[in-house]
Structure formats: structure tokens, C-alpha cells
């Protein structure tokens, strides 16, 4: 889903927009600058003066005229102080007062029933998987997919598999590195199919990047858990290849996976994960799960839940199944009622949170290199908290006097404790 965010007023409103943007992206949605292209528009309104309130009303009307089909959510001071008026404005679907701003993304997705699947299992660009910033670049190396998962519209949207030449990708990464990028993320609609249209493989590409560039960190974007090269696990012996993979499982029930026409069943998935974790301790595996796929019985749901729990994931993107015209799954019988999907989604969100904390705890006490990013927050004691990511993609926060001194550098840190959505670290 495409989300357009718009704000009026103070810097605080702007900062909230950034937080919401990240939260929407973490849920698998994309941010668009064009209101006309959005499925959902969120306006952070202002009421500091009469004029600001008038401008907020005008903006809401103008945006609705520009894209009447999009769902429209209004928050901020104008909407809080004039709730009834805001609710009556043409096109407004939901008003969220300032007191609920922190849960705006979750409320919007559940109340407007928009917590649904992305267009395809693996979105190119990966903006939803990884934090953006000046230190990380996304390099699309492949497009298209030759598989036909029954929920996926990719055949229509993306066509045949096409891979970019290795030399071109290596040159691009060398240029990015010379411009100050320290982490390259290679992405594709079906990244594992890299080279299927030539005589090369994903393994050849990774080896070439590691040998012909000096980029300190190479990360793989979302990767379907099949067709992995034979020497795949050994590639991670090189510490410049980051020990984190997003492997979309979609369901932990084999009968559901069959209806989805997935090429990887639970046993093979388990083998891949075990191989990676045995070779590289603390390897982070994250995944996508669709809940409420057509015909998903209570028993299948429990099978799926148990498999997910036993496997353990660092994070899960959860999608309630939604019918997508043109896909085989939309014609399958026994579509699941919304209330059941919501309940399963809630249960899985709780499990995800527990597993995430568990994975964070397992990493406490380790000393690990962190790529420190430009994202910082001021603290009451005059210091700043700067954030960064470990090789296995754990978000880490550290108190420092001068964040600029370590921004975009890779410096070791000791992971001390968990705090909300990050690990607390000290520089070593
Ligand atoms: S492997 Fe399946 S889900 Fe992934 S892009 Fe291809 S058809 Fe879509």
C-alpha cells in the first residue's frame, strides 16, 4: 500500500511524520510523495492560530479533491481541538487525537482494515525492511519472477526474470562506496533467481562484490527460501556479508504452503535456517507471514503458529490475507472472515514481540561492530543517543557527547541491555 504523509505546523509535527513513515514501512507499506498515488493519506494538522486551523481545513479538502479514492486520516492539534468538525469534513475516514498519536499507525491499519498484504512477497527496494539513511544504499540487481505463488500479482506486475550484469553492479557499488556509503543492500523481486537469464548465479554476484569492491558491509534483501546456491552458507564465512536474511516463509503449515504454490515447505525451511545458525552463531532470520489465507483451518493455523514459534524469528512482517484480483488465491473457496484474520494476526503479533525480545536478550553481552547512522535524539543530560545497526541487524542505541564524531563509522560496541525497540550499548 502507498501512504502519503503531510504536515502543517511545528517541528514536532514533522518529527512525528518521520516516525509514522518508519512505522508504516516496517509494516511493509511504501511512502509516496504524491498524494494522487496514495491508497492512504495521513494529515498532521495544526491549530496554533485561527489561520493555521483554516489552513488545516483547506488542506484536508484539497487533498481529498486530489485523490478522493484514498482513505484519509487526520491527526494533530486542529483535529484534536475540533474533533467533531474534522470528522464531518468531506472525505475524512478517521480522526486520531493527539493522545493516540503514538499508536496512529496501528490504529489506522486496524480501524480502516488496511493491514493487508503487499503487492508481492518480495518488494523491490526493500525500504520496508531496512532503515534508510546516508550510510546504506539499495541496489536493484534483478527484476521479475518465474514462479506463480497463488497470492502474488508479480507475474502481471513485473514480468520475466531479468538480471543486471555483475560488472555493472560492482561498478555501481564502487561508486557508492567512494561517495561515503558503507553498506550495500542488493535486492530483487526474486533475488535467488539472479542469473537465471544468464549463466551466472547469486553466489557469483556475491563473490564478485566481496572481491572487487571494498564496501565494508554487504547485505541481502528479501530472499525466497529456495534455489539457494550450494555454497550459500559458506559465503557467510566472509564477515563483510552480513549474517541476516529475510526469508519469506508465508505460512508454517505445509498444506497452506501447497495452496500458496510455494516452493519451500517447512522441512526445507528448517534445514536452511539450521544450516545458517550452525555456521554463524546469532544469525538473524526474519520473515513474512500471511494469516488467514483462504481455507486456513484452525488446525493449520495452530500448525503454522507452532512451527513459527519453534523456529524463532528476529522479526516477522505479518499480513492479513487480502484478495487481490487477478491472482489464483482470490478465486479459492473458503475465504476467511475478517474477525478470524484479526484474531490470528493479534496472536502472531504477540508471539513476534516475545521472539524479538528473546533474540535481543541472546545478544546481550556481545561486543560487535555497529554502523552508526545519522539518526540521533537529544537527551536531558545534554548528551545524545545515536542509533546504529549490528551486522545481524539489531538496532542499537548509545549515549554520546558528539554524535557527529561517530556518524557513518563502524565502531565496536558492547550490547548491555534491551530498551523498548533497541539494545543499549556502550562504545568499546
Ligand atoms: S516467488 Fe512467489 S511470492 Fe515471490 S515474487 Fe515470485 S510469485 Fe511472487
Image (spheres, rainbow, N blue to C red):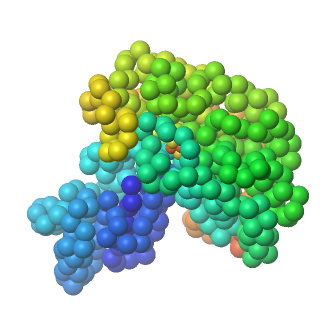
> Residue 110 placed where, x, y %?
31, 44
Which residue corresponds to the image point at 32% horizontal and 59% vertical from the top-left? 39
Which residue lies most toward the top here? 299
Which residue corresponds to the image point at 76% horizontal and 29% vertical from the top-left? 275
Could you say which quadrant of the image residue 384 lies in?
Answer: bottom right
Looking at the image, which is closer to me, 375 or 289?
289
Count the marks. 0
- Please say if 56 is above or below 347: below
Looking at the image, which is closer to me, 351 or 185?
185
Looking at the image, which is closer to me, 121 or 109?
121
> Residue 269 placed where, x, y %?
64, 28
> Residue 410 placed where, x, y %?
79, 61
Residue 83 shown left or right of residue 315 in the figure:
left
Residue 116 shown left or right of residue 219 in the figure:
left
Quadrant assignment for the C terminus: bottom right
Which residue corresponds to the image point at 49% horizontal and 39% vertical from the top-left? 148
Quadrant assignment for the N terminus: bottom left
- Please say if 73 is above or below 349: below
- Please say if 109 is above or below 248: below
Could you say which quadrant of the image residue 117 lies in?
Answer: top left
Could you say which quadrant of the image residue 141 lies in?
Answer: bottom right
Q: Would you say residue 410 is visible in this rendering?
A: no
Which residue lies most toward the bottom here? 51
Residue 150 shown left or right of residue 387 in the figure:
left
Residue 95 shown left or right of residue 406 in the figure:
left
Looking at the image, which is closer to me, 392 or 291?
291
Q: Would you say residue 18 is visible in this rendering?
A: yes
Which residue corresponds to the image point at 80% horizontal and 35% vertical from the top-left? 230
> Residue 178 placed where, x, y %?
79, 75
Amino acid at each position: 500500500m502507498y501512504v502519503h504523509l503531510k504536515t502543517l505546523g511545528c517541528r514536532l509535527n514533522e518529527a512525528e511524520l518521520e516516525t509514522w513513515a518508519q512505522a508504516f514501512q516496517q509494516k511493509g507499506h511504501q511512502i509516496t510523495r504524491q498524494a494522487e498515488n496514495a491508497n492512504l493519506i495521513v494529515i498532521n494538522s495544526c491549530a496554533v492560530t485561527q489561520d493555521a486551523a483554516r489552513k488545516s481545513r483547506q488542506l484536508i479538502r484539497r487533498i481529498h479533491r486530489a485523490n478522493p479514492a484514498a482513505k484519509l486520516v487526520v491527526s494533530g492539534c486542529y483535529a484534536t481541538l475540533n474533533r467533531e468538525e474534522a470528522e464531518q469534513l468531506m472525505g475524512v475516514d478517521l480522526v486520531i487525537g493527539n493522545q493516540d498519536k503514538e499508536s496512529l499507525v496501528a490504529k489506522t491499519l486496524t480501524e480502516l482494515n488496511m493491514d493487508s498484504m503487499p503487492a508481492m512477497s518480495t518488494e523491490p527496494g526493500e525500504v520496508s525492511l531496512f532503515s534508510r539513511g546516508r550510510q546504506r544504499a539499495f541496489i536493484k540487481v534483478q527484476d521479475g519472477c518465474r514462479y506463480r505463488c497463488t497470492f502474488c500479482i508479480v507475474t502481471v506486475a513485473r514480468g520475466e526474470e531479468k538480471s543486471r550484469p555483475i560488472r555493472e553492479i560492482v561498478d555501481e557499488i564502487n561508486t557508492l562506496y567512494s561517495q561515503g556509503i558503507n553498506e550495500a543492500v542488493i535486492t530483487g523481486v526474486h533475488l535467488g533467481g539472479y542469473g537465471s537469464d544468464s549463466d551466472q548465479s547469486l553466489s557469483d554476484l556475491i563473490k564478485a562484490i566481496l572481491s572487487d569492491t571494498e564496501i565494508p558491509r554487504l547485505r541481502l534483501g528479501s530472499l525466497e527460501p529456495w534455489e539457494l546456491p550450494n555454497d550459500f552458507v559458506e559465503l557467510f564465512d566472509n564477515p563483510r556479508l552480513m549474517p541476516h536474511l529475510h526469508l519469506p516463509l508465508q505460512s508454517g503449515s505445509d498444506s497452506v504452503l501447497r495452496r500458496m504454490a510455494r516452493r519451500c515447505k517447512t522441512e526445507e525451511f528448517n534445514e536452511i535456517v539450521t544450516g545458517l545458525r550452525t555456521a554463524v552463531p546469532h544469525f538473524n532470520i526474519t520473515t513474512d507471514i500471511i494469516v488467514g489465507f483462504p481455507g486456513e483451518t484452525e488446525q493449520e493455523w495452530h500448525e503454522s503458529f507452532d512451527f513459527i514459534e519453534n523456529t524463532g524469528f528476529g522479526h516477522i512482517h505479518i499480513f492479513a490475507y487480502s484478495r487481490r484480483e487477478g491472482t489464483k488465491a482470490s478465486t479459492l473457496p473458503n475465504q476467511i472472515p475478517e474477525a478470524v484474520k484479526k484474531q490470528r494476526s493479534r496472536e502472531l503479533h504477540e508471539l513476534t514481540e516475545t521472539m524479538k525480545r528473546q533474540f535481543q536478550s541472546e545478544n546481550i553481552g556481545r561486543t560487535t561492530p555497529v554502523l552508526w547512522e545519522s539518526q540521533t535524539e537529544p537527551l536531558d543530560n545534554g548528551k545524545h543517543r545515536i542509533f546504529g545497526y549490528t551486522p545481524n541487524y539489531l538496532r542499537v542505541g548509545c549515549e554520546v557527547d558528539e554524535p557527529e564524531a561517530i556518524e557513518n563509522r563502524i565502531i565496536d560496541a558492547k550490547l548491555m541491555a534491551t530498551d523498548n525497540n533497541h539494545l543499549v550499548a556502550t562504545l568499546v
